[in-house]
Image (cartoon, helix red, strand yellow):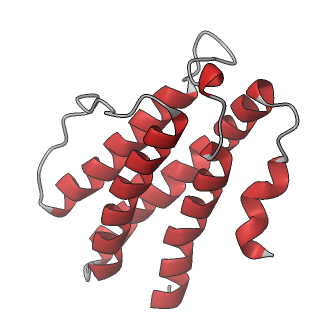
Amino acid sequence: MTDATFRATMESPGHKLRAAFEGFPDAGLDAQLSPQSMTPRQIAEHLCDCYLAFEDALQGKKHDWGAYTAKGSTSEELLQEMMSLRGAAVEKALAATEVKHKLEALEYISLHDEYHIGQLCLLRLEADPEWKFDSIYAHLM
């Protein structure tokens, strides 16, 4: 994978996450699609945990999963917190030179984001039926 392709692979899910979460109705942050699923708030917190787990992996440290608690309470605050931690993790991923760390970045950041983006879109449509789901691809147009 070229450096440019790796960068695009790391950055694209960030645009989708931002589009899915930006303007998310605060009243829908604690909604679930099923009893087993995460809420948007839990997804944001979990992704923050993943970004920190990547940073721990870079340092060879074992991550304490589930120890992270989001500081924000509104969708705007959660988005800002998530994007800040994500941005820091992506910068470290782009600077990584070992293939092992590039693969960890894909797993902890990019692929993990993509896994949860679909869930966020469904939750967003449930909370805001007028939301345009294809807006997550606006960065490609």
Q: Which residue is drawn at 49% across and 31% down?
A: 74
Q: Which residue is drawn at 65% across and 22% down?
A: 28
Q: In this view, does 30 lie to the left or right of 127?
A: left
Q: Residue at x 65, y 36 (%)?
A: 24
Looking at the image, can residue 2 be seen?
no
99 or 105: which is nearer to us?
105
Q: Position of residue 138 (x, y in %)?
A: 76, 66
Looking at the image, can residue 28 be seen?
yes
Q: Position of residue 136 (x, y in %)?
A: 73, 56
Q: Position of residue 27 (x, y in %)?
A: 63, 20
**Count of numbered badges drawn on the protein:** 0
Indicate whether 79 appears above or below 140.
above
Q: Is residue 87 left or right of residue 53?
A: right
The image quadrant where one finds the C terminus is bottom right
108 or 77: which is nearer to us?
77
Indicate whether 53 appears above or below 35.
below
Q: Residue at x 12, y 61 (%)?
A: 59
Q: Position of residue 119 (x, y in %)?
A: 66, 35
Q: In this view, does 62 lie to the left or right of 21?
A: left
